[in-house]
């Protein structure tokens, strides 16, 4: 299943602040099948404010992961992706969320304050997530822009 997912991953990057500036790098191939793999891939990066993982899958959903010391914060853009994608399912398991019902509307799950101390509030995220025409990688681009590394994000994934 992991090999199948790799072809579906649109974005898989780590962003971290080092010596006052943002650094971006692609996450290694093969770590996006499970949230624990993503967390392990993020832990080695040095950062003044935690390492941010951004993964978008199949124009369907994205996951934000913020690893800071021993703590990990998670945000899943669409809880309905849990039934179709192992990565989304592993995030829901980590967050101890109930399985979505068949008639559930798309909605985010997890920590909407994940980036609040960096200038992207829960309200900002909610507005970005509420745009039905925005693809997950575009929303991640908007988040990157708000955080101050939009050009580096576009150069890496564009």
Image (cartoon, rainbow, N blue to C red):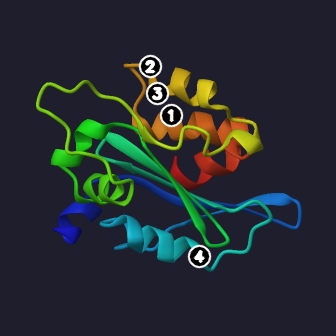
At a point 66% along the width and 75% down the height, the residue shown is: 45
> What residue did someone put label 1 on?
139
Q: CA distance from mark 3 to mark 1?
A: 7 Å
Q: Nearer the viewer, mark 4 or mark 2?
A: 4
Mark 1 to mark 4: distance in Å? 24 Å
User: Could you tell me residue 68's position as x and y percent?
Assistant: 66, 65
Kindly check if marks 2 and 3 are in contact, taking CB atoms under 8 A apart as contact: yes
Residue located farthest toward the left when viewing the structure as drawn = 102
SS of the residue under disc 2: loop
- Sequence-first disc among 1 and 4: 4
Q: Is residue 126 above or below residue 155?
A: above
Query: Is any part of residue 148 visible from this angle?
Result: no
Q: Are marks 4 and 3 in contact (CB under 8 Å)?
A: no
How far, Cα to Cα, is label 2 from label 3?
6 Å
Place of residue 24 in the rendered image (x, y in percent of width and height, measured from the top left): 65, 61
Labels 4 and 3: the sequence-earlier one: 4
Q: Residue furthest bottom?
A: 44
Callouts 2 and 1 close, C-beta under 8 Å: yes
Cβ atoms at labels 3 and 1 below 8 Å apart: yes
Classify the position of the N terminus by image quarter: bottom left
Determine which residue is flagged by label 3: 129
- Indicate which disc residue 147 carries: none
Residue that badge 4 annotates: 43
> Image point 80% across, 64% down: which residue?
48
């Amino acid at each position: 299943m992991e090999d199948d997912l790799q072809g579906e991953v649109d974005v898989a990057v780590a962003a971290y602040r080092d010596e006052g500036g943002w650094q971006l790098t692609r996450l290694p191939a093969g770590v996006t099948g499970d949230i624990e793999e993503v967390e392990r891939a993020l832990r080695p990066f040095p950062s003044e404010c935690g390492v941010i993982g951004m993964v978008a899958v199949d124009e369907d959903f994205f996951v934000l992961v913020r690893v800071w010391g021993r703590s990990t914060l998670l945000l899943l853009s669409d809880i309905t992706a849990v039934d179709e994608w192992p990565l989304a399912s592993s995030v829901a398991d980590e967050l101890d969320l109930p399985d979505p019902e068949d008639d559930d509307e798309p909605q985010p799950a997890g920590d909407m304050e994940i980036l609040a101390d960096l200038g992207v509030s829960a309200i900002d995220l909610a507005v970005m997530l509420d745009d039905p025409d925005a693809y997950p990688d575009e929303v991640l681009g908007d988040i990157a822009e708000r955080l101050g590394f939009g050009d580096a994000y576009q150069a890496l994934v564009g």
